[in-house]
Image (tube, rainbow, N blue to C red):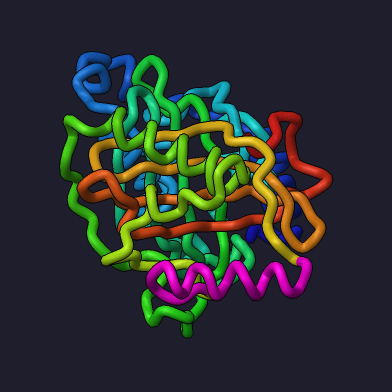
């Protein structure tokens, strides 16, 4: 979860940067066909590399739209605040490693870890980034971030596991499966249908507090119920997928506070066989008026 320190740093450097003279890059205008030939995935990777690899103002201008819409609660909207934060990222050596990436129309989903991520509130974090591409530039960004937990209940990390995209012809079918799973199980319409959605033979769990398998999930849910601390899903904003991977972006409550729930599912033969997630508290005050969703 990004800390208040992150918000303060972003605002400070953004204000400082906006007082100076911005040198617009000419790379896009000199070769617009180059950008038009890139896929949304390539544009998303290029934009993130500009932020977390080259720390390049010119590349940020090339890949990110000037009116970039920001949903990270600690970062002001627009391209200028992103530009202003580059020196902080470079000074810390903050870097991104993409573990999974997939595309759904103009949306690109990244499941990543960030090292030297002190500006984000912890040395190492795991995140889901969702980027929308419009007119060959990054036009909008959503994310959810949490610190990496070294010891997990399942022994798995919050990011390891299969990465290969398969079953591309089943994308819509798998998205419907997750939509129905959310409604029946997480929203409670038909809680007895759990085994209709989750494989009884394999269910690899990457939530750090939950063990593998249906038994591990049941144990965790029973414990939360006994503590009167069950998470509550209230609204799902997006379901994005490609092939065997589907991400849901939902909001709700946990620990008596509003939360963003990002859940990534891997599907085989019509059943959920693996799950990763990031849960981030939704702050009362944000650096913009866009909300987290």
Point out the image quarter for the N terminus.
bottom right
Q: Which residue reaches farthest bottom?
A: 151
Front-most of residues 244 and 150: 244
Above or below, 277 against 122 in this view is above
Q: Can residue 180 be seen in this view?
A: yes
Using the rendered view, name the quadrant where residue 254 is placed. bottom right
Prevailing SS of the magenta stretch: helix
Q: Is residue 143 visible?
A: no
Q: Where is residue 215 in the image (x, y as percent from the top left)?
A: 44, 73
Above or below, 135 against 208 in this view is above
The count of marks equals: 0
Does the magenta portion include 259?
Answer: no
Above or below, 241 against 9 in this view is above
Point out the image quarter for the C terminus.
top right
User: Residue shown at 37%/23% (left/top)?
Assistant: 106
Using the rendered view, name the quadrant where residue 81 is placed. top right
Q: In this view, does 65 lie to the left or right of 257?
A: left
Q: Give the range drawn in magenta.
A: 210-228
User: Residue shown at 56%/50% (left/top)?
Assistant: 191
Does the magenta portion include 216?
Answer: yes
Front-most of residues 168 and 52: 168
Q: Where is residue 275 in the image (x, y as percent from the top left)?
A: 40, 58
Using the rendered view, name the quadrant where residue 220 is placed. bottom right
Q: Where is residue 100 in the image (x, y as percent from the top left)?
A: 30, 52
User: Residue shown at 47%/43% (left/top)?
Assistant: 181
Q: In this view, does 283 lie to the left or right of 41?
A: right
Front-most of residues 74 and 251: 251
Front-most of residues 4 and 153: 153
User: Residue shown at 64%/56% (left/top)?
Assistant: 280
């Amino acid at each position: 979860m990004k800390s208040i320190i992150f918000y303060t740093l972003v605002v400070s450097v953004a204000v400082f940067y906006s007082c100076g003279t911005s040198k617009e890059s000419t790379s896009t205008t000199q070769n617009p066909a180059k950008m038009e030939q890139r896929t949304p995935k390539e544009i998303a990777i290029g934009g993130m590399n500009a932020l977390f690899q080259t720390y390049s103002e010119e590349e940020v201008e090339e890949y990110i739209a000037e009116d970039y819409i920001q949903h990270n609660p600690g970062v002001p909207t627009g391209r200028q605040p992103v530009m202003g934060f580059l020196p902080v990222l470079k000074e810390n050596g903050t870097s991104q490693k993409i573990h999974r990436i997939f595309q759904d129309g103009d949306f690109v989903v990244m499941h990543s870890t960030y090292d030297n991520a002190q500006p984000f509130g912890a040395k190492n974090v795991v995140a889901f980034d969702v980027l929308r591409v419009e007119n060959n530039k990054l036009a909008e960004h959503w994310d959810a971030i949490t610190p990496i937990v070294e010891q997990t209940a399942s022994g798995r990390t919050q990011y390891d596991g299969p990465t290969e995209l398969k079953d591309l012809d089943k994308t819509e079918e798998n998205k419907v499966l997750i939509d129905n799973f959310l409604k029946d199980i997480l929203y409670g319409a038909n809680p007895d249908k759990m085994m209709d959605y989750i494989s009884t033979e394999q269910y690899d769990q990457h939530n750090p507090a939950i063990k593998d398998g249906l038994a591990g999930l049941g144990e965790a849910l029973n414990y939360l119920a006994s503590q009167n601390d069950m998470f509550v899903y209230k609204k799902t904003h997006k379901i994005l997928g490609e092939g065997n991977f589907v991400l849901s972006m939902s909001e709700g409550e946990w620990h008596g506070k509003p939360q963003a729930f990002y859940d990534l599912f891997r599907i085989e033969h019509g059943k959920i066989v693996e799950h990763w997630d990031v849960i981030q508290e939704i702050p009362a005050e944000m650096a913009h008026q866009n909300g987290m969703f």
